[in-house]
Amino acid sequence: MTYKERTQDIYNQIGQGKLMEAFEQYYAPNVVMTEPNGTREGKDACRAYEEQFLGMIKEFHGMEVKAITSDEENGIVMHETNMDVTFQDGNRVLLEQAGVQKWEGDQIVHERFYYKG
């Protein structure tokens, strides 16, 4: 399976409501995740953040993968996605983001997300 196919699988799983299953399968123990509001280091810290995010969602309306491209030789995947969610406070939002993943073997060791914060 190529890195691009692995990333597509991640987003297929997210679209099926399996974000944490995809996280456990594809993220390395030493993963670093960076986004506009901070950086988390290690799978435990990243897992806690993802669980907190999921806890804020009242309803998931869908997701769209706009683009995925990869540099297979160097283990780099870039993706552009959006998610339509309603938060616990009733606010419905279209979350748009782009990201860059660095893969080593079968797992992501670094991922940076770009979005309007």
Image: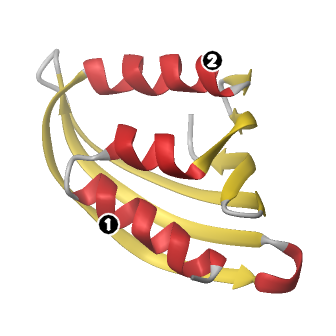
User: Circle 1 sits in a helix, a strand or a loop, which is it?
Assistant: helix
**Residue depicted at 65% across the width and 24% down the height:** 37
Three-letter amino acid code at disc 1? Asn
The residue sitting at 75% across, 61% down in the picture is 103
On residue 12, the disc is: 1
Return the mark for residue 45.
Answer: 2
Left/right placement of residue 93 relative to residue 33 reads left
Considering only vertical position in the picture, is 85 above or below 108? Answer: above
Left or right position of 38 against 115:
right
Alpha-carbon span between mark 2 and mark 1: 24 Å
Residue 78, given in percent of the width and then of the height, sits at 66, 70
Pointer 2 local density, CA inside 10 Å: few below 14, some 14–19, many at least 20: some
Residue 57: percent from left, percent from top: 22, 27
Residue at the right extreme of this rendering: 74
The vertical placement of 71 against 31, above or below, is below
Query: Which percent across, then down, holds residue 73?
Result: 86, 84
